[in-house]
Amino acid sequence: MMYNIDLVIVGGGPAGLMAANTAAEAGAKVLLLERDGHLGGQLVKQTHKFFGSEKQHASMRGIDISTMLGERLDAFDGRVTVWTNATAIGFYEDGVITVDHDGVYKKVKPERVVVATGASEKFLSFPNNDLPGIYGAGAVQTMMNVYGIRPGHRVLMIGAGNIGLIVSYQLMQAGVSVAAIVEGLPHIGGYAVHACKVRRAGVPILTSHTILRADGTESVESATIARIDRSWNVIPGTKKTIDCDVICISVGLTPLAELLWQAGCEMRYIPSLGGSVPLRNDCLETTVKGVYVAGDVTGIEEASAAMVEGHLAGLEAAASLGFKSDNYDAERKDCMDQLAALRSGPTAEKIRSGLACAESR
Amino acid sequence: MLINTGVPTREQLDRLLPSPERRARGPYAMVECFQEIPCNPCSTACPFDAILPMKDINEIPAIDLDRCTGCGICAGVCPGLAIFIIDESKKDGTATVTIPYEFRPLPEKGETVNAVNREGDVIGDATVTRVLASKRTKTPLITVEVPAELVHDVRFISLIDEQSFSDDTSSESQKSPVSHETAPKTDDEDEIIICRCEGLTLRVIRDLIREGYTTVDEIKRISRAGMGPCQARTCGPLIAAEIARMTGQQVAEIQPSAHRAPVKPLPIEFFLGGDSE
Ligand SMILES: Cc1cc2nc3c(=O)[nH]c(=O)nc-3n(C[C@H](O)[C@H](O)[C@H](O)COP(=O)(O)OP(=O)(O)OC[C@H]3O[C@@H](n4cnc5c(N)ncnc54)[C@H](O)[C@@H]3O)c2cc1C
Ligand code: SF4
Ligand code: SF4
């Protein structure tokens, strides 16, 4: 059978959860699809306190924000349906979304869609990069913080962005030692306060370094790193072998935009946003009418921005169906102001320049 | 520099230091947050308005030390764990520093622990004088007593039986950022796996590009790269970057592979089933 509904939201991370809350609040009937068995997206794994301001729940831990947003949905009983273990597997030209819901094939035909599928991790090529013990940082976080499994004893982290720094910190909290954080750029990409936190806990941060290879018979036993110049050429005489049983790769995320490609949305490759992103207008509507986007799928940012974008997309999708709340104008302006504030600092310079290229028309 | 090493410079720290009179008077907060980031809980949490309100959320926090009582509330909420409470008012050659410490086990009051500096090196002993484990922030605040001359260096503790694993970290600063996508060249093509699902090495991919297959889709059709469980999420960007490198193009110019449903491999019986509620 075909399920007909006002609004389908694909992805139950911070962006999708906020979109569901806002659209349901305005009066729309919402179906939220989440491929995992639980809601929250990346937030479920974030045991550290968040940045931002009170409006984006700064200083709360990601996991607590996720629980709070999930619980809010209960207030709209009847208007919000949540399917977990539900992967949207196809998005067709006629607007039908196909779903694998707990192994059952379902078809949904919504009036509007918010795609909030988040991102996937980038990988690196180096010799023996298929040895057991080499993980993406997201996988390590899932193992530790969702399933309580330590990935190993001694980790070499590749990448000193916020994720590399935070996952290193969380590894130490789990009692795993971190041999070093290796970063190809001459500077640390993540926030300085995160870097200070891992430095004083004894982890060296080796900027202008890269991994040359992994070695081991059955699984990772060591990694070779070296200093590089600005063109990524290895500086002779700087090779160093680091004993480790885990190599954790944290070299960035890329938007998980397959459904948008399938729907025929116009996409543009914007390196500073992490890869190919959908062009959209200031209502977060893509070039395909009725298809809205929010969160990391629009470009890699933070949960704080993802929540505000989710709010905006939910508001606009509902409004376009005639569910316009009394304070629509005020809410819209508030979202715009929050996004502008979050993106106004020097650390967001790349994001600002990327976003300027992602506007449709 | 801080952004090369993760350690603030002496000058940055010296600028935070209060006047000698203020230091002698009683506890105060050292807000070691030197970068404009979108964050403001310290300023909204201070009950005495000592951390000045921020007009723009990216502002670097500014503190009015005459209003600061050293209560430590800001140190508990700061997501960067960047605030420390210093008390140099005792005249007995010791001073205390309060450190946000999110590790288990927690030390106990009276316990001797290693005093660790911003580089992660053990620089002496410290005695724990207070352990404040707030249920609300879940960031325990540990106050330790150290020799007064070390109080501006001690920023972490480790329990005595744990080893510290610091290493050489010097790193000269270099300009012109290069993205990770320009991975270094290597001669070890046979050992580098590009498509994990189908077990394809860099050599296979490079040979195909040399033969003239220069879109991700062409390579996918001839080699099955990207047709496994991950559906090109891992190898797609690596192949695009390799094509760009070998053909002298920008990654943006490389045609990405077509994205077709389903987004993950499923057995055919799945589609035959369907729900008939
Ligand atoms: C280690 C780490 C630390 C971070 N720290 C911070 C921080 O301190 N502050 C901050 O603001 N941000 C932080 N972030 C970033 C933040 O987590 C992300 O920006 C945010 O989660 C993005 O939200 P999202 O809703 O767009 O995507 P996600 O959280 O990734 O959620 C997307 C959801 O969509 C689901 N999904 C994907 N495809 C499908 C499909 N086809 N069908 C159904 N469901 C699907 C996924 O399972 C997932 O649950 C951190 C991220 C990491 C990895
Ligand atoms: S220590 Fe207390 S008074 Fe001082 S800045 Fe922090 S919260 Fe305010
Ligand atoms: S709360 Fe901490 S990290 Fe955030 S601005 Fe204040 S001092 Fe900096």
Image (spheres, grey):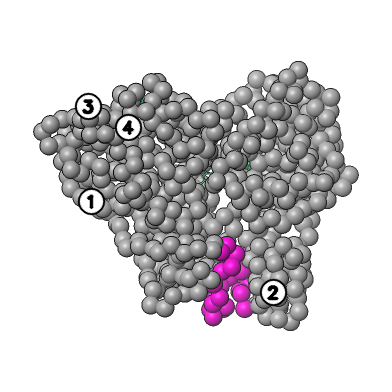
Same chain for labels 3 and 4? Say yes or no.
Answer: yes
User: How many other residues sit within 10 Å of disc 4, few (<14), some (14-19) or many (≥20)?
Assistant: many
Whether residues under marks 1 and 3 lie with C-beta atoms below 8 angstroms apart, the answer is no
* In this picture, residue A112 sits left or right of residue A352: right
- Ligand 1 within 8 Å of disc 2? The answer is no
Instruction: Indicate the amino acid at tag 1.
Output: Val
Query: Is the N terminus of chain A in the top left, top right, bottom left or bottom right quadrant?
Result: top right
The segment highlighted magenta reads B178-203
- The mark closer to the camera, 1 or 3, is 3
Subunit under mark 1? B
Indicate the position of residue B191 as horizontal and vertical percent values. 54, 75
Q: Residue at x 27, y 48 (%)?
A: B117
Secondary structure of residue under mark 4 = strand
Subunit under mark 4? B
For label 1, the residue is: B122
Q: Quadrant of residue A310?
A: top right
Which secondary structure type mostly characterizes the magenta part of the structure?
loop
Secondary structure of residue under mark 2 = loop
Instruction: Indicate the amino acid at tag 4.
Output: Ala
Same chain for labels 1 and 2? Say yes or no.
Answer: yes
On screen, residue A168 above or below B211: above
What numbered label is drawn on residue B25? 3
Task: Using the numbered discs, state the Cα–Cα distance from disc 1 to disc 2 in whole angstroms.
Answer: 50 Å
Same chain for labels 4 and 2? Say yes or no.
Answer: yes
Indicate the position of residue B193 as horizontal and vertical percent values. 58, 70
Q: Ligand 3 is located in which of the four quadrants?
A: top left
Q: Residue at x 76, y 20 (%)?
A: A325
